[in-house]
Image (tube, coloured by chain):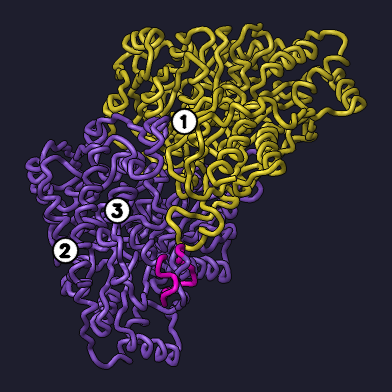
Chain colours: A purple, B yellow
Amino acid sequence: MNHQETLTTYLASFIQELSNSGVRDVVISPGSRSTPLALLIAEHPTLKYHINIDERSAAFFALGIAKQTRKPVALLCTSGTAAANYFPAIVEAKLSRIPLIVLTADRPHELRDIGAPQAIDQIHLYGKHVKWFVEMALPEIGEEMTYYARTTATRAISTSLQQPAGPVHLNFPIREPLLPRLDPSPFEELENRPAITVKQGDTLLESGEMKKISERLQRIEKGVIVCGVIDYPQFSTAVLALADALGYPIIADPLSQLRSGSFSEEYIIDSYDAILKEIVSDEMLYPDVIIRFGGMPVSKPLTKFMKRLAGTEQYMIEAGNSWRDPINAATQMIYCDETLFCEGLLKQLDEKRHSNWLEMWQNLNRIARNTIINEISDITELDEGKLVLELVKRLPQNSHLFVGNSMPIRDVDTFFHFNQQNIRVLANRGANGIDGVVSSALGASLYGEPLFLLIGDLSFFHDLNGLLAAKMHQLNITIIVINNNGGGIFSFLPQSNEPKHFEALFGTPTDIDFEYAVKMYSGRYSKVRNWDEFHHSMNEAITLKGLNVIEVPTNRNANVDIHRKMWKRVSAEIEQYVHGEKE
Amino acid sequence: MNHQETLTTYLASFIQELSNSGVRDVVISPGSRSTPLALLIAEHPTLKYHINIDERSAAFFALGIAKQTRKPVALLCTSGTAAANYFPAIVEAKLSRIPLIVLTADRPHELRDIGAPQAIDQIHLYGKHVKWFVEMALPEIGEEMTYYARTTATRAISTSLQQPAGPVHLNFPIREPLLPRLDPSPFEELENRPAITVKQGDTLLESGEMKKISERLQRIEKGVIVCGVIDYPQFSTAVLALADALGYPIIADPLSQLRSGSFSEEYIIDSYDAILKEIVSDEMLYPDVIIRFGGMPVSKPLTKFMKRLAGTEQYMIEAGNSWRDPINAATQMIYCDETLFCEGLLKQLDEKRHSNWLEMWQNLNRIARNTIINEISDITELDEGKLVLELVKRLPQNSHLFVGNSMPIRDVDTFFHFNQQNIRVLANRGANGIDGVVSSALGASLYGEPLFLLIGDLSFFHDLNGLLAAKMHQLNITIIVINNNGGGIFSFLPQSNEPKHFEALFGTPTDIDFEYAVKMYSGRYSKVRNWDEFHHSMNEAITLKGLNVIEVPTNRNANVDIHRKMWKRVSAEIEQYVHGEKE
């Protein structure tokens, strides 16, 4: 068989199987060596491809789609530094457990390490930051090689999905000429069922072990459930039922998806960050057991609280074989699917429990939340915390809120209070980078409208290139840029006590007028000067299509002062309540 | 000793030694974990630091400084994806042999792989793309540890400089609290001489071997010297003397630094790309020996020509232990410092040789060059090839031309003809990526003014973030953006024969109005509509300070037609000359 037919059959078999095994979206960056894969993907009857020119943004865009859809997304780029640009998003995907199928084109073996253009060493390019690496065979024909191409696609997908999910990397050596045969379509004759299907079992704790745990929990009145970063709809239902059966409050991180939904707020504690921040005598809050799910919560006061309780029983439930206990406080690592763990316990727990313990947490939460709202309502100037409160109030039902790292996610933690609007909150909390956030949000918006992105100015700047996707693919997104002209988080850290070099090294004001960037990408831009204008822009945003950017200028120093004043006030209220309880 | 003193002494010793051993510039991206290193670098009496917020741009910026100054440049960022953003520039630095000292801050061991925020696996983060990786010891005090910190700095620098030069990576685990002692300055008491100095020998071929080669060359009249990517001033002098002694023409890639300088053009062949492009009967050009220096030249016709001559003696001279012969044509790999090789031969060659062979090359070169100039002079519309010609004419003496990859470097190859303006031509020709070019050029401009960057629209887009450095550091640069609205190179490739999907996958027009971007970074922008406007903008550019962008809109299809027409014409003229010579 000639070169073109071999190239076409082998690669088309692979691509067909990506589709057969569950991939729908492919993010492609233009390049030459990847030509046959790109053309075949474009030609495929059901795969959807999305062009993204900057590979760094492309990979974060794919991450966003995968995060939102909870499905594996493929990525394709050419050889050379193009592939190296994927690295930040791959690192993030590995830690945040997002399934990505990374396809890189490469020079064939005889053109490697001999100074050929755009040839870099792509073998294990991403090191330990992918779950699986395959140096693909050169295109070859025959039953065995077709089976190899097909099953490698299927294995790539199933590997990316296995707990903990993550990225895989397949490197394709391809010889010239690079054009595949497109007419007649090579997909017409290919099967639309995978050569082999993969069924994935879940990690399940043996029932005797489950019984022991349920018996233990039934004897403990003062328990707390901590839900960090975890995003499975079935889990939300199961953990709420578990809380109900045990009478335990759920300390719910904004990324637990338990701060918003069509369920009762009875068990949801959302203001723990404020409660635990400056509390002096917190003994009455000490539980006798903590059941922990998901990645570490955002709140530092919470993690410190759990660390203080290192002597107390703490169960860390993990579906995947990883270890997420940076506070060294877990007493039991329980490797078990989180949903099945909750459901398994529920089967063993007979009677519903009512306790003062739960009521105390509910009271504290009410006090903290109301104090925050009261304190904030008096603020007339534009403020980062109040912004979250005002934003969340105005989010439409079933909308998506993508949150930038550094300060925005912390403010969301403090100011996004429970509501029944069914808002899905997303963020890149694997490595917590400020990079790639615009692209991730745009990727998420593809199948997740309406979507609002709350982001700081440095993070927005870092991925301005990501905005091109909004323009090229007519995506609908509202981006709220908190512009405090630099790195706001450093004002909260000890670095701010060293005024020498502070602005130069940490404040780093850029003085960028973002209106230019938004206009460049054909977006709508408004810079609000007060709350009325913010409300007006938000009202507009709900009806607008396309890229819409609302810039909210704030002041780094004022922001620190307002936060600190508010926490002091909450602390005083909490202390008063605690004092009253004690007497 | 307390934590702060230990942190300060250990890290200050390291930083002092960076300076003692030859580092002057450090590019810093803001972050928290890197705080002690950043503050100490800022506090250092002689180190110069440059803030660059986007780590991808930061690394390319450092690469540009190092390329221009031929000195190692250090880079500093915090832990997490920040470090992953360095990857593209590191890959480029490895292949283009640029010494970078990459410093990344990291969580200490007890906070790794347990879900701590911003903690990723940074051990061997860049795999084989750095020359040396060191997981640094935690800050510790004592004579031995101070010696370790100091010598590791010195070794990092000398390793980065050893042939082939390249990047090294030092990963610093650092415990909180992160603030070092700055008052009194920790550098006052430190020595300003390195603990150990490193003397680096050069690779030198044994004199008996050199004698054999010189004797062989003296018997060959028809020889050609090919200088690819190579950039040492001493080498230029030596190779020109060698050409003079042997009577061989030098086929000089634009990145050989032999196309411009205060020397005679007698031996310089600059229009070989056009000569060899469509030539039918090229036997009369066949040499009996080729002496090759440096990385593969840009010209595809040249590499094909050398490949056709695979039976002929071809010496590849390499100072470093690498292998750069993607055409499988070298018959001898000679590991020897390139300058010493030329000088060694010169000592053995007695009489200067004159030959018809050299004259023929000179004649062909004159015909090709004149035909190109004539053909181009008739073009009235804006054209990419003519742009290079017009640009080079207007470059001031001793200026720097940074050239983008893909089409610009190819057009410079064809249209940058020999001149005595002493223009240094720079490009990222390790992996030939279109990424990071803006930042590399800006880095080069820091100590290399005046600097002009010639770049395509996709490459300009890819590193728009790089422009922030121009604004923040008041750099002076003139950027000429060739805007053909997409990937112009693909129109020259077989992909263009497949019209289906072509614009979507390869043409990829972005329809960006770059004026917005330039304004955002406080630059001066002009879009020229004709040659008069271009000349006017260039005249202005020479006197302007700051960021100055000249956009030249061109048409991808017209560009292909004009290039092809010109090559046909050159080919016809060459054939006519060849025919005349034969008769």
Q: Earlier in the sequence, mark 2 or mark 3?
A: 2
Image vertical order of residue B311 relative to residue B390, above or below: below
Q: Amino acid at mark 2?
A: Ile
Q: Residue at x 34, y 8 (%)?
A: B536
Q: Main secondary structure of the magenta part?
A: loop
Q: Are marks 3 and 1 on the same chain?
A: no
Which residues fall within the magenta stretch? A307-327
View extreme (front): residue: A583
Question: Within 10 Å of the Cα at label 3, are there few (<14), some (14-19), or many (20+) other Cα atoms?
Answer: many
Tell which tag, 2 or 3, sits nearer the viewer. 2
Q: Mark 2 = which residue? A: A367
Task: Indicate which disc residue B437 carries.
Answer: 1
What's the chain of the residue with tag 3?
A
Question: Within 10 Å of the Cα at label 2, are there few (<14), some (14-19), or many (20+) other Cα atoms?
Answer: some
Q: CA distance from mark 2 to mark 1?
A: 55 Å
Image vertical order of residue A191 relative to residue A37, above or below: below
